[in-house]
Image (spheres, helix red, strand yellow):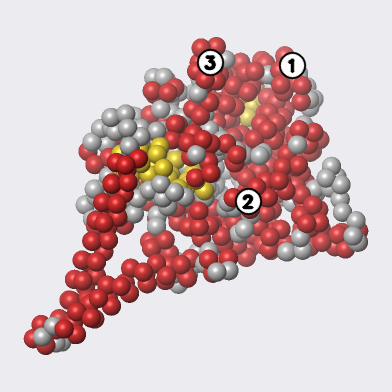
Amino acid sequence: MSSSLKYNYRVQLLLELAKDFIPPLLIASLLLSFLPSLLSDGLFLQSLWHLSICIAYWTVNVKYTDWKNGNEAKKMGGVYLPRLKGKWPGNLDIALSLAKLSEEGYVLESFERLFASPGGGDEVTTFNLGTLWRDTYVTRDHRVMQAVLATEFDNFWKGPEFRMRTRRSFGDGIGGADGAEAKAHRAMTRPFFARERVQDFGIFERYTDKVLTHLLARSNSSQAIDIQDIFSRFTMDAAGEFFFGSTTFNTLDLPLPPPNKKSKLGPKGTEPEGSYGSFAYPFEKLQEVTLIRNLRGPLKVWGLMEFWKDETKIHRLAVDAFIDPLIEDALKEKRKRGMKQRDPDEGNLVDHLVDMTNDLKLIRDELFNILTAARDTTAMLLTFTTYLLCLHPDVMATLRKEVLTYVPNGPPTFDDVRKMRYLRAVLNETLRLFPPAPLNLRSSRLSTLLPPDQTTNGKPIYIPGGTTVLFTPLLMQRRKDLWGSDADEFDPERWIDKERVKKMTDDPFMFLPFGAGPRICLGRNFAYNQASFIMIRILQTFDTFTLRQQEDAPDGSCPPASWRGAPGRKGIETIWPKMCISLFIKGGCWVHMSIADS
């Protein structure tokens, strides 16, 4: 089957429905042919027979699958996790509550509640969601994540259904690829994260200067600025030059949103306007649609809801209109070069992609995947770091003292950044509390065993082949049994204290902001260097960050009053963390920065 059909969710949905309905309907038709007319005449009776046999067929099928899995689990010496028991058939009530809490509650609160007492039982680290009687394991266990991402890597993949959810958004790029295809994508992009490239701070400096100009202008006018917006522009412009060799993004040269409580909310912050808005809005909507599909669970749920209208189509067309001219320019350059290819140490990612293929769609997909990762990961790290520094002026003072000790003015070098232990501690603590990808997933290829939960009496967890595993780095990195009673608190010192550092060194899967194993994020060092560079330059200039969320964020952005006093960070948060594919702050993060005394 061609990939266009294999990953076409409408085609696959119809095939799944055919598997569910055709056998029982054939059985019903055969049975009716033998029944006396008294029991089968009339549309009502025939419909009742068909419905009854369908329900019986599905029930037997589910029971048989459960028996088979339970029997295989015993043979393998594991425990088959029972599905949660909701009030509605197929746990549809739980699925709907997950979607509702995701929209109205604190980030991943919907899952956190189920971990606390799934079905009223003891607290667990892994449970079986079981929407539409389909096994879906959800975990906050770092040992399970280690198995999925590293030790059992070959048995876990993104899988065909993930590809169906994301194909119209991310296409055939690195994000959804598996196996040999994924290795080829990584081999193609890895040279652009080589040490020499990510240590070249020249690109960072050019765009940091533009950011500082905006920050100084708002500071002088006593106005707040949406740092989520400006950091997103900064990372996009820098990625545009680093990967595409393009200086035409220039989003930092376009007007920034002013503080205005009546501003219209976009997918993340204030809805952007103008040429930047024509790209940023659909770019963010694509990520939002992907999250909604993931939360809705099986193809039979989200596929049915989007059968007549693919929610990604209009947004992908708008994004392509922005990216395609960049590719066309590179193809023109290729034609000028003739058969001569770029040296691996020269040119940019687009140049090398067009040397490898003339497939416009494949090039576009790869660029979109890379741009999404490069823009959002660092932008969110910078946004949440600034937010936490607003809440912790003592940390801000300590960090600024370190910055001024090593680099009192001017751009830092790579060696300067390496010396700043406290800066790295602040960034790591931010990534612990607010990892850019708070939720991720894989699917098992074959039946296997995962590390035990406290409810399995020391026995490993059995997972059937073809089962989706949702893993939650955000919830894992806030577990008190792993990180201590102060796990919800922002404390960079935990990354300097020798005993705590040793524990993390001995168990590195406690901290997974960039994933792990063969698919660990290629751009993690790029993100650290980029975030360090701009934070140093900002802290050289400003000595006070003041959060202005209540005063300046658009209406509907601030946490509701009902959050106050809630357990964990929910009760103390002054911004509203949300999640698309990556974490973000609803309505943006509005901060006023004060100029340091000279």
Position of 386 with respect to 325 (left or right) is left
The disc label shown at residue 502, or none: 3
Q: Position of residue 485 (x, y in %)?
A: 39, 19
From this viewpoint, is residue 194 visible? Answer: yes
Residue receiving disc 1: 406
Q: In the image, is residue 352 above or below residue 408?
A: below
- Disc 3, disc 2: CB below 8 Å? no
Which quadrant would the N terminus be assigned to in this image? bottom right
Which numbered disc, 3 or 2, marks the residue that appears first in the sequence?
Answer: 2
| The furthest residue to the front | 75
Q: Secondary structure at mark 3?
A: helix
Q: Label 2 belongs to which residue?
A: 180
Residue at x 68%, y 50% (from the top left corner)? 184
Q: Earlier in the sequence, mark 3 or mark 1?
A: 1
Between circles 3 and 1, the one closer to the viewer is 3
- Mark 1 / mark 2, whichever is N-terminal: 2
Give neighbour class at mark 2: few <14, some 14-19, many 20+ (Cα, 10 Å): few
Residue 576 vs residue 327, the one in the foreground: 327
Cα gap from disc 3 to disc 2, whole angstroms = 36 Å
Q: Is residue 584 left or right of residue 223?
A: left
Asked if disc 1 and disc 2 are in contact, CB closer than 8 Å, the reply is: no
* Type of the residue with mark 1: Tyr
Up the image or down, 120 lies above or below 347; here it is above
The tally of labels here is 3
Report the side of 72 relative to 212 (left or right): left
Closest to the observer, 177 or 373: 177
Q: Look at discs 1 and 2 and give the one toward the viewer.
A: 2
**Pointer 1: residues within 10 angstroms few (<14), some, or many (20+)?**
some
Q: Residue at x 24, y 81 (%)?
A: 29
Which residue occupies 68% across, 19% down? 420
Q: Nearer the viewer, mark 3 or mark 2?
A: 2
Which residue appears at 80% of the width and 33% of the height?
A: 196
